[in-house]
Amino acid sequence: MTNPSPELESAPTQNALEWLEANQKLLTIVAAVILIAGAGYWFVLRSRSDRSLSADKGLQTAKRDMALGNLQLAQSDLTRLSKDYAGTYSGTEGAMVLAQLSFDQGKFADGVQLLQGTLSKAPAAMVPEIDDLIAGGDISLNKALDAARSYEAAAAATTLPGERAHERSKAARSYETGGDTARARAIWTDLSQDFKNPGIAAEARVRLGQAEAKAAGRG
């Protein structure tokens, strides 16, 4: 068997060294870009972490003020928190607490407006609860159909089957209150076959029976 020529063995190594020498500037630039990108990614993560921690502290401060009965200071803290830390979990919770305080004071329109402005930046896991709160505010404003649509939005946003069925049942009741009996009936019909949520399914069948009896009485 013939041994490989020393020249052939050294050729790949020599070519690699020549390529490295010829592209040294390019490699330096690539390495710098990677280093800067890594540093930037770390900075973003660190900034997000610091921002979340600051939001958590702000929320705890507001809750302490509420516990001490200083609602005016709490509202001021929550207003600042919801604006400065929008999109964080604590900032979003702060907006929800602030909206609930508005509801407690009878300022339902203010609370609904605040929550609607919070939705676009809110963490996905908190969207169903926000939509549910909006619906509650709309109910108090005698806007049953708006409430029904918000309940349906909450149902669409949640990943929990039981919660979805519960929100849809509230939507159906609100549609009934608002006079959209056709939409209410469609939801109840669907829920009546939801065997994973027997309590809601039973209510749906009762509601459908009541609607049929009412229609027969008019006939």
Image: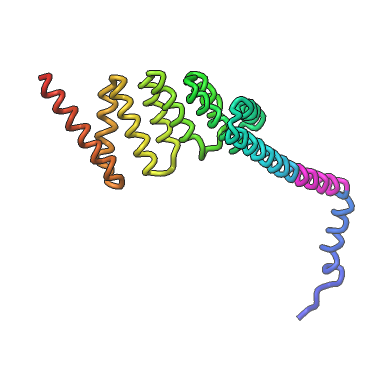
Give how far across and how far down residue 156 sits, in percent: 41, 35
Q: Nearer the viewer, residue 199 or 101?
A: 101
115 drawn magenta? no
The secondary structure that most of the magenta stretch takes on is: helix
Residue for point 12% across, 19% down:
218
The answer to whether residue 199 is visible is yes
Q: Nearer the viewer, residue 18 or 214?
A: 214
Q: Residue furthest right?
A: 21
Total marks in image: 0
The answer to whether residue 87 is visible is no
User: In the drawing, does residue 195 fall left or right of residue 95?
Assistant: left
Give how far across and how far down residue 82 sits, in percent: 61, 29
Q: Quadrant of the C terminus?
A: top left
User: In the drawing, does residue 125 fall left or right of residue 188?
Assistant: right
User: In the drawing, does residue 142 fall left or right of residue 32?
Assistant: left
Q: Which segment is the magenta one?
A: 25-40
Up-down: is 10 above or below 82? below
Up-down: is 63 above or below 107? below
Q: Quadrant of the N terminus?
A: bottom right
Give how far across and how far down residue 184 sits, in percent: 28, 27
Q: Residue furthest front?
A: 68
33 drawn magenta? yes
